[in-house]
Amino acid sequence: MPETQAPWAARDSLRITSVRAVVTAPGGVPLVVVRVDTSEPGLYGLGCATFTQRFHAVTAAVEQHLGPMVVGRHPADIEDVFRLLHFSSYWRGGPVHNNALSGIDQALWDIAGKRLGVPVYELLGGRVRGGAAVYTGARGGSVEESIERAAALAEQGYRHVRLQCGGPGLGTYGAEGTPGGYPGSPYPDGWDVGHYLRTTPRLFERAREVLGDELGLLHDAHNRLTPKEAVGLARSLEPYRLFFLEDPLAPEHFDRLPEVRAAAPMPIASGELVTSMTDATRLVTAGGVDYLRVHVSAVGGLTPARKLATLCELTGVRTAWHGPPDVSPVGAAVNLTLDVTSPAFGIQEQHVYPERVHEVFPGTPRTVDGYLVPSDRPGWGVDLDEAQAAKYPPQAHLHERWAARVRRPDGGLEAP
Ligand SMILES: O=C(O)[C@@H](O)[C@H](O)[C@H](O)CO
Ligand SMILES: [Mg+2]
């Protein structure tokens, strides 16, 4: 497409020659990774484009819409390519488009590092810390089970754990429930907010009794509360000194987050469901968060995320980039790059990938003693073995099967 080519002369003859999306599910969750090839044999880049719930749509956006616009471009014009892809659809953003854009954006940063033989963190000004402190989830069907799991993680060297505990019916977010927990209700497998608000303080009270004062304790309310319920929960958890309380409100109510944050004794973390750099900026400037938890690929990749990291640095907000199972190992390496290069780093959510994921993605970051330390390999330091990847075809509607079941005992559908 001649219109999408740069109106300036490139410094050398290197060009983007092809853009492809690869979908693979070695850990069960469908992951989408974009591979950008260049005219230099063996020089390619990888980027995370994982919107696991809509992976076919992302693949089409990459291969049918965005990819053809960047073939023939010099891979070093990252900022211009980002703006070109962002503005060229006129209606911009949204998780499908942004994930496709992220796949290409992050692949170009990978190529930039590989051309120079340096990790991407050196392109961003270098490291400001040795590693990133992480948290991972401790979940169980009962209070004691959740706490046992947290103790086991502390034993492995984790200094922070996110504690989630099940309960009747569907159970609360991130932990197993007890089927049929609300007998006689229209939906016996439901989730009851009153039960959740009454029992969660007991989980943390017991956690402090058993685990002591040093372990960082976090909790994810997963968008299910009203502003008043959120403040009530936050106040009831005050004695247990949470590291942060995550996602008290759904994104539909983010204009109420500043008042929740003002009334909450602990730091508030939110933003994983934000799908634009603009919305993430508003969350910070409106005073809605102490920790900004953006899903990097959902806002378009490293290019917008590093601007958000700078915004956080300049406004006294900390980062906690979203790191669930539905971020590919390439995305995990991008998160880690932001963590070690930004003075605003707060904490990193870490998913412990099963070994099969390491086989598909050689170089997948591993936590040691509660820290992730970046690789010194060029680019992101993570590769994609496509022969291995092909062994794990994606399964459609994996996430939707779970999210479609989040209802109250009366049958009313909730934010998951
Ligand atoms: O903070 C988290 O890790 C969760 O909110 C998950 O990202 C969400 O359930 C989708 O996987
Ligand atoms: Mg969350």
Image: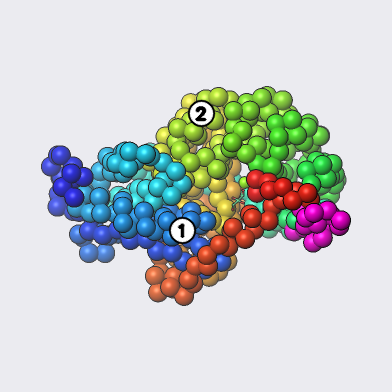
- Residue 154 seen by the camera: no
Of residues 221 and 224, the one nearer the viewer is 224
Identify the residue at the far front of this view.
Answer: 186
Mark 2 Cα-neighbour bin, 10 Å: few <14, some 14–19, many ≥20: few
Disc 2 marks which amino acid? Arg
Q: Position of residue 133 (x, y in %)?
A: 59, 46
Q: Is residue 186 magenta?
A: yes
Q: Position of residue 90 (x, y in %)?
A: 33, 38
The relative height of residue 350 versus residue 299 in the rendered view (above or below) is below
In the displayed structure, does residue 94 sit left or right of residue 66? right
Disc 1 marks which amino acid? Phe
The answer to whether the residues at label 1 and label 2 have Cβ atoms under 8 Å apart is no
Mark 1 Cα-neighbour bin, 10 Å: few <14, some 14–19, many ≥20: many
Residue linked to disc 1? 55
- Find out if the beta carbon at label 2 lies less than 8 Å from the nearest ligand 2 atom: no
Q: How many marks?
A: 2
Q: In percent of the image, x 63 and y 28: which residue is there?
A: 256
The relative height of residue 184 versus residue 208 in the rendered view (above or below) is below
In the displayed structure, does residue 124 sit left or right of residue 25? left
Q: In percent of the image, x 45 and y 32: which residue is there?
A: 278
Of residues 98 and 204, the one nearer the viewer is 98
Q: Mark number for residue 282? A: 2
Who comes first in sequence, dot 1 or dot 2?
1
- Residue 280 seen by the camera: yes
Q: Which residues are magenta?
A: 176-190
Q: In percent of the image, x 72 and y 25: which residue is there?
A: 263
